Amino acid sequence: MKRVIEARASTILFKFLINNQGLLRNGKFLLPANICPIIPVVFSKAKVFFEFLDISPQTQSLDQDAVYSRIQRDPDTINGVLFVHSYGYKQNISSLFKTISIKWPEKILIDDQCSCIPDINGESISKFSSLTLFSTGYAKHVEFGKGGFGFLGERAIYKDYREPFNELAHQQLVEQMKFALSNDLPFKYQDVAWLKFDQEFSEKDYFNKIKITIPEALKCKQRINRIYAENLPSEIHLGSKFTWRFNLQVSNKEKILNKIFENGLFASSHYKPLSSVFGGEEAPVADRFYKRMINLFNDHRFNEEMAFSMCKIIKKNII
């Protein structure tokens, strides 16, 4: 299985999509409704159609039964599936991918593990995956602010492709997406030079740095997570299997976030269901969790003093 690296994981996805147009028809890719907005933008740039499906409340990722049912209902309209391991919850998708590959061998199956711990040797990937993605971009388990790598399946075609890159175009695209999401307005994609193609690091140095950084990053997360786990009510924890952030479910999310920022700290929300900006059916499960979810930082941006302060703010304001 071939391993590739690029300036961003989204660059790998784009190159994969445009290089494998021969495997694509006029059908759609199934994407989770709570996916990072950059992914459907990549699909739009590659001129590949997509459709959102709701998530499982237990895993925060695509409902695997719903995926199978959707393909079975009308297999000719579906090109493939992009499965995201939300919040770093590493799920076993081999059974789903195997079942789809046997019954519909033409389907393209993409395993997005960008929120998981990078697996530089590919030990955790499914042999039925057409492409498996990892990222070392902003706020990932291993964060370099750039870089991504992937493993290609046997049928995958991957040839070099480059376009000019314009940082201002990228910033404008991000702002346009934020504006659309915050105002529930349709996002109309217009192709500009927003995607970076030139990588600025050697393959050997890149993977050596990942190998060195993983233990340090995990140690930091474990230390901060322990503070959260011991000082916040257990009933609001999403669960330890979600490794990317320390995730909470609360009924007064906006109030708590406001209090966090008022006290000079920071936390984040998660991705809003994207049907409001890209179109498609509503995703009630993804929407319900979006309205309740707070992601607490547990990386190099946070120290123990900040984590204890965070716990006090949340306990004081939780309903």
Image (spheres, rainbow, N blue to C red):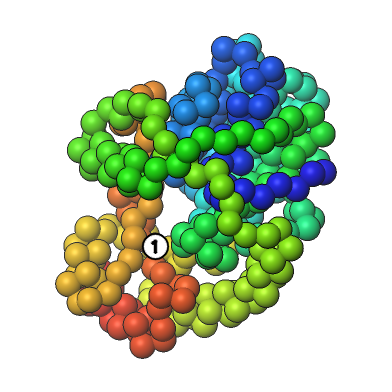
Compared across the picture, whether 244 is left or right of 312 comes to right
Q: Classify 201 as above or below 231.
A: above
Judged from this view, the residue extending furthest toward the front is 164
Give how far across and how far down residue 168 sits, in percent: 32, 45
Residue at 64% x, 20% y is 21
According to the image, label 1 marks what residue?
295
Q: Where is residue 226 in the image (x, y as percent from the top left)?
A: 50, 81
Q: Quadrant of the C terminus?
A: bottom left
Amino acid on which the number 1 mark rests in the picture: Asn
- Name the foreground residue: 236 vs 92: 92
Whether residue 154 is visible, yes or no, is yes
- Residue at 71% across / 58% down in the picture? 203
Residue 288 makes an appearance in the image: no
Q: Outermost residue, bottom direction?
A: 305
* Total numbered circles: 1
Is 272 positioned to the left or the right of 122 in the image? left
Residue 156 vs residue 94, the one in the foreground: 156
- Report the side of 176 relative to 132 (left or right): left
Left or right: where 289 falls relative to 11: left
Q: Could you say where residue 40 lies in the image, as x and y percent from the top left?
A: 46, 33
Q: What element carries label 1?
A: strand
For label 1, the crowd category at 10 Å Cα-Cα, with few meaning under 14, some 14 to 19 and many 20 or more, is some
- Seen at 71% across and 47% down, the residue is 4
Query: Could you say where residue 309 lies in the image, as x and y percent from the top left?
Result: 30, 83
Q: In this view, does 178 lie above or below 306?
A: above
Identify the image quadrant of the N terminus.
Answer: top right
Which residue is depicted at the point 39% across and 32% down? 192
